[in-house]
Image: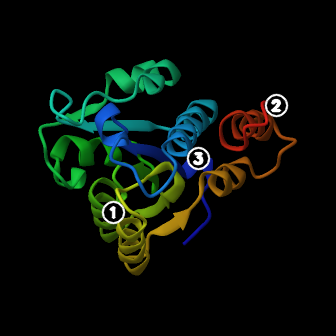
Amino acid sequence: MNKAVGNRAAMILIDHQVGTMNWIGSVDKATVQANTRALAKAAVALDLPLVFTSSQENHMQGPLTPDLEEIAPAAFAARVRRPGIVNCWDDPAFAAKCRDTGREQLIMAGVTTDVCLAPPAISAAEEGFDVFAIVDASGSPTALTDEMAFRRMDRAGVELMTTSALISELAVGWSSEHGTKLMKILGDEVLGTGH
């Protein structure tokens, strides 16, 4: 699997909804929220295609978190609202939106890891995409649940990464224009250093 390269990648954020975030028990919820913001901000900073999707926003899952709308209002407005299809890759509108980015690498994160991230990550990998699953911008009810999802994705050829590792690979060099932007995002959101 090749490292993530900005001009070949799209950012795909799955079901980071007000209700689903409350189901996270495997990782600190605030960490998942900060890392998800960092991924969305990185996509905006690098002008990567950014795809949001949600499931049944008018049910217990709730709407996408409001911070995502603040970061990327156009992508938020254009989100794919699924009617409850579990593997979002099986939703024709979602899969088409990912394919239509024209990118061969899909950077994915989702809540929950086992239900919302692993199935579409595996499906996209089976279709031939290079898929990077960002494990700390995802979460499940238990650590065991996450572990089983990680094992499934790893066996299917999905590259498991952290937010900081992904942002570092996208930066390539911290002194470049992109690197400087990404360093600020990393400091503000992931490392909490505020510079």
The residue singled out by tag 2 in the image is 195
Spatial CA span between label 1 and label 2: 33 Å
Q: Quadrant of residue 47?
A: top right
Quadrant holding the N terminus: bottom right
- Say which residue appears at 17% left-offset and 52% top-offset: 86
Residue occupied by mark 1: 118
Report the Cα–Cα distance between label 2 and label 3: 26 Å
Question: Hey, which residue is sitting farthest right in the picture?
Answer: 175
**Which residue is depicted at the point 25% across and 34% down?**
80
Q: Which of marks 1 and 2 is nearer the N terminus?
A: 1
Q: Please name the amino acid that badge 1 sits on.
A: Ala
Asked whether the beta carbons under mark 1 and mark 3 sit within 8 Å of each other, the answer is no
From the image, state whether disc 2 or disc 3 is nearer to you: 2
- In this view, the residue in front, 72 or 32, is 32
Per the image, label 2 sits on a secondary structure element best described as loop
Measuring from the top left, give residue 9's x and y in whole percent.
52, 50
**Callouts 1 and 2 close, C-beta under 8 Å:** no
On the picture, is 4 further left or further right than 52? Answer: right
Q: Is residue 100 visible?
A: no
Instruction: Name the amino acid type tagged 3.
Output: Asn
| Residue in the foreground of this view, choosing between 3 and 168 | 168
CA separation in Å, label 1 and label 3:
24 Å
Q: Position of residue 6 (x, y in %)?
A: 61, 47
Residue linked to disc 3: 7
Q: Considering only vertical position in the picture, is 154 above or below 160?
A: below
